[in-house]
Image (cartoon, grey):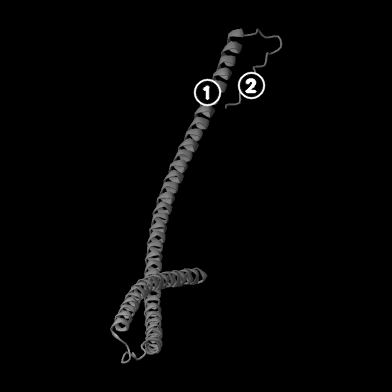
Amino acid sequence: MPNIQAPKIPEGDKVDFDDIHRKRQEKDFAELQSLIEAHFIQRKKDEEELIALVNRIDKRRAERAEQQRIRAEREKERQARLAEEKERKEQEEQRKKQDEDAKKKKALTQKTQAYGGLQQKQSEGRKGAKKQTEREKKKKILADRRKPLQIDHMGDDKLKDKANELWQWLMELEAEKFDLSEKLKRQKYEINQLLVRVQYHQSAKGRGKGKMGGRLR
């Protein structure tokens, strides 16, 4: 802004008010022009700062969007790897479980067969011993019952009586034989039922031990 000084009024001279008013207007105009120039300079500076700020915001926004895109891709890849690893582990565990179940089933089958073979041998041995014992008992009973008939000194009436007595005795033997046969059938049936129940309980007990062993592992 130009350096404008107020006019001095000479002593004894005539005062020129028009000149004073003109100079004041020039001063006011110069000050206004300086303010306008300063305003435009500050406005331009503010606009430049605003443009720089907008550019920085846009740049930061683009950088954040790129970072988020990269993180999203990495997270997607990580989730895919986790899912693949999980599926692989599940397949591996399922395969191991199937192998263990197959081994347990095979071992149980072998034990059942071995036990069945042993039980069959023991049963056959008992049956053989029982048959031999029963055969000996039958021989002894028949030997005791089958006494030689002494009929040489008997007459006709006594022979008839003896024949009737033998016939009655034969009928009693037939009835006793039938009763014993039915009793033997019932005993065989009960024994078979007991054997089936024993085998079922032993098989269930073996399965229970297999399950407990699998959990302890």
Could you tell me the amino acid type at mark 1?
Answer: Gln
Where's the N terminus, which quadrant? top right
Q: Quadrant of residue 85?
A: bottom left
Position of residue 55 relative to residue 143, above or below, is: above
Residue nearer the viewer, 79 or 75: 79
Write the residue at 68% across / 13% down: 10
- Residue for point 50% across, 35% down: 45
Secondary structure at badge 1 equals: helix
Q: Which residue is mark 1?
A: 33
Q: Residue at x 67, y 16 (%)?
A: 8
**Near-viewer residue (144 or 34):** 144
Using the image, determine if residue 6 lies above or below residue 70.
above
Q: Is residue 163 left or right of residue 92?
A: left
Residue 179's x, y, as percent?
36, 72
The residue that label 2 is drawn on is: 5
Label annotation for residue 2: none
- Residue 10, placed above or below residue 76: above
Q: CA distance from mark 2 to mark 1?
A: 18 Å
**Which one is earlier in the sequence, the residue at label 2 or at label 1?**
2
Q: Position of residue 171 (x, y in %)?
A: 32, 75
Task: Return the residue nearer the eye: 174 or 110.
Answer: 174
